Amino acid sequence: MKVLLLGSGGREHALAWKLVQSPLLTELHAAPGNPGIAALGHCHPVRADDPEAVLGLAGSLGVALVVIGPEVPLVAGLADALRRNGIPVFGPGRAAAAIEGSKQFAKEVMQAAGVPTAQVLPQPAAPCVLKADGLAAGKGVVVCLTQEEVTAGLAELAGLPGPLVVEELLEGPEVSLFAVCDGVTAIALPVAQDFKRAYDGDAGPNTGGMGSYAPVPGLDAVDVEELVDVTCRPVLAELAARGAPFIGTLFAGLMLTGDGPRVLEYNCRFGDPETQSLLPLVDDDLLVVLAAAAQGDLSGVRLGPAARAAVTVVLAAGDYPAAGDQGSEITGVADAEAAGALVFHAGTALRGGRLVTNGGRVLNVTAVGADLVAARHSAYAAADKISWSGARRRGDIALAATAGGTLQTRPEAHLD
Ligand code: AMP
Ligand code: GLY
């Protein structure tokens, strides 16, 4: 089977790494891809958010499946355009991708489906959370503890389009729940945690994610099924009833509060950097799963997680997230791989045969171990072999989880 993978980040490199392990794969194509993906397949200089160019490429290659990584082309309706042209796609159409593209739509669907989420407040009064409606690359949410923060937050979000959602401030550990969906059924992946803040101890500004790990201690397979039952399957049914069946990965950002799990947001795609930790835990053939979902029939398909753990440490530019780094030579990737780690590229480029920095989040170092302690140790040992001028990483990815667990809240104790 010929596959076209869209995107250029660590998530897409991890998807490519897993897809090429499938005996069903004949050719892997990517657009635009990155140097890591280029070592696994053919990269084409086509932007994932240029629908005409993607349609032309998919048609000329004659691919049997397109896998769309990022949210922007999904929310813009790329999957619909491909399907209209008879090309199977893993990724929701525009109407279903609105679950990520519009916070207001997501709230309305959650309310109709009876999914537990933060209450909408009539007024922006502290404490509360302000959310811009549309995609805002992680900059559309302001958590306000004081009225001064509300005033500042309102000013900050005033320039963004769409209505503002104001909701109650919740507390508890956050986890990322992923369900692969065929429009009707949902199959769960292990639950992951990511680390959004720039610096150790969850300090500093929000980023695209500085690391991840999976599985989350304290959530066994039964707990995960319950979470999918409560937070994903009702939304899947509601979207299908509205004529917008969701085919792709439904990613619920959950807060495990003292009153039970609450959905903070949905994403319509795999998470980055969660995917880098999740896919090395999957023994089943990912291409079989994604192709079956794209055909609308996941029945009989397995996505069984292995009994091991994975930790991903992101290596970022020194000034990330304020700025990226360009052109600094990267050394030590082969050494990190020789130590047994997976090195997934994100912001890298090849210049004259040398690997250089080309972005904010540059590399992801993922290690798998029998448990989180072993995986964490290997991930940091490998990450320490890689360097460039100004490289930065957090030192506390998965630290709390290996030191006895971050989750005081077992969700099944709170599910109705
Ligand atoms: P979102 O884009 O909706 O996931 O929000 C980004 C981040 O804001 C989340 O990862 C949480 O840390 C925080 N957040 C969002 N909604 C709430 C809420 N209702 N209560 C507390 N924190 C929230
Ligand atoms: N790691 C969070 C995201 O992919 O949105």
Image (cartoon, grey):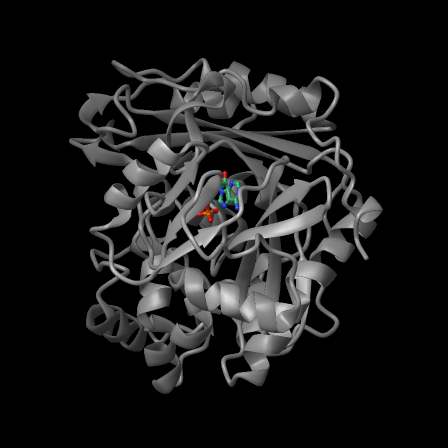
Q: Is residue 314 visible?
A: yes
Image position of 314 with respect to 248: above or below: above
Image side of residue 129 versus residue 325, left or right = right
Quadrant of the image occupied by residue 394: top left
The answer to whether residue 355 is left or right of residue 84 is left
Residue 215 spot, x, y in % from top left: 68, 38
Between 406 and 16, the one nearer to me in the picture = 406
In the image, residue 397 sits, relative to residue 133, either above or below, namely above
> Is 118 positioned to the left or the right of 53 in the image?
right
Quick check: can you spot residue 2? Answer: no
Image spot of residue 115 (x, y percent): 65, 63
Total number of numbered discs in the rendering: 0
Give the vertical position of 223 relative to 234 (above or below).
above
| Residue at (53% x, 47% y) in the render | 168
Residue 273 in the image: x percent, y percent? 47, 39
Residue toward you, 26 or 230: 230
| Nearer to me, 5 or 68 | 68
Instruction: Pick the quarter of the image with the C terminus.
Output: bottom right
Residue at x 75% of width, y 20% of height: 404
Q: Give whichever of 186, 136 is nearer the camera.
A: 136
The residue under the point 35% across, 78% down is 82
- Provide residue 358's location: percent of width, then percent of height: 23, 33
